[in-house]
Amino acid sequence: MIGPAYLKIASETFRLLRVGLLPIVLYLAVFTGGYVYFETSALSSYALYWVFALFDWGAMFLLFLELLRRSGLLASGLRAGIGTYFVLGMVTGIPIILGVFALALPGIFLLTRWLPVFPRVFIAGGSKRDALVWSWQSTERLIKPLLVAMIGPVFTMALSVAAIFHHDYVYLVDQDWDYSPRYEFVISIVSNLAMLSSIVWYTLLSISTYRFVSQIETEQQLPA
């Protein structure tokens, strides 16, 4: 059933949003503002943009750890570090990107099946391969509720892509094109805020899904 599982995951996601609201808002404000500056300011440079993007990746890692801490799941401490975060991101990211470019749906399916993989590695430990296998098996019976839960992050990412598409393939190719600083500023805010919000939303959903799946495993292990 979609209902009960989805409601429990959604409830935990919003609970985690409440307890982690301050670092989330700070992250979104700082990095949305930074990207908007680099995209609209004449004083910015591509080199500094990519340095800033690297800081963004590091900040997302720290936000992930902080959300894990505030979720109450780190009682036994961390079982992995930034190296694992990077490698696991590459291992999962490449097939997901290829899936998105292939037809979008395969990428979304992989994102859904690997939702709890990052919390699994950092909380329970073990190898990255074991975590991927565990995540795939654990989400097998939750595909429908998880796909429903994924509507939010997918929609916000689609909004970001739509804003970028309009800027690059409608606004810039218009024969009567006239530079509009206001449009550039607004479209930059929309595209970056939506993209970063999608990543944060997915991270919240990842932790919530891990908690839900772990609770199911614990209940199944309890003696009747």
Image (cartoon, rainbow, N blue to C red):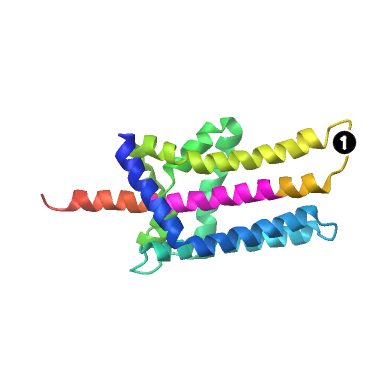
**What's the residue at 64%, 43% (across, down)?**
160
x then y, percent, for residue 154: 53, 40
x then y, percent, for residue 65: 47, 64
**What's the residue at 81%, 58% (across, down)?**
45
Residue lying farthest left?
224
Give the left or right position of residue 1, taking residue 133 as reference: left
Span of residues in magenta: 189-208
Give the left or right position of residue 192, taking residue 91 as reference: right
Residue 211 figure quarter: bottom left
Q: Is residue 154 above or below residue 119?
A: above
Queried whether the magenta region covers residue 52, the answer comes back as no
Q: Is residue 86 above or below residue 97?
A: below
Magenta region's main secondary structure?
A: helix
**What's the residue at 57%, 30% (across, down)?**
103
Residue behind mark 1: 177
Q: Amino acid at mark 1?
A: Trp
Give the left or right position of residue 221, taking residue 102 as reference: left
Residue 145 figure quarter: top left
**What's the residue at 46%, 53% (across, down)?**
204
Q: Secondary structure under badge 1? A: loop
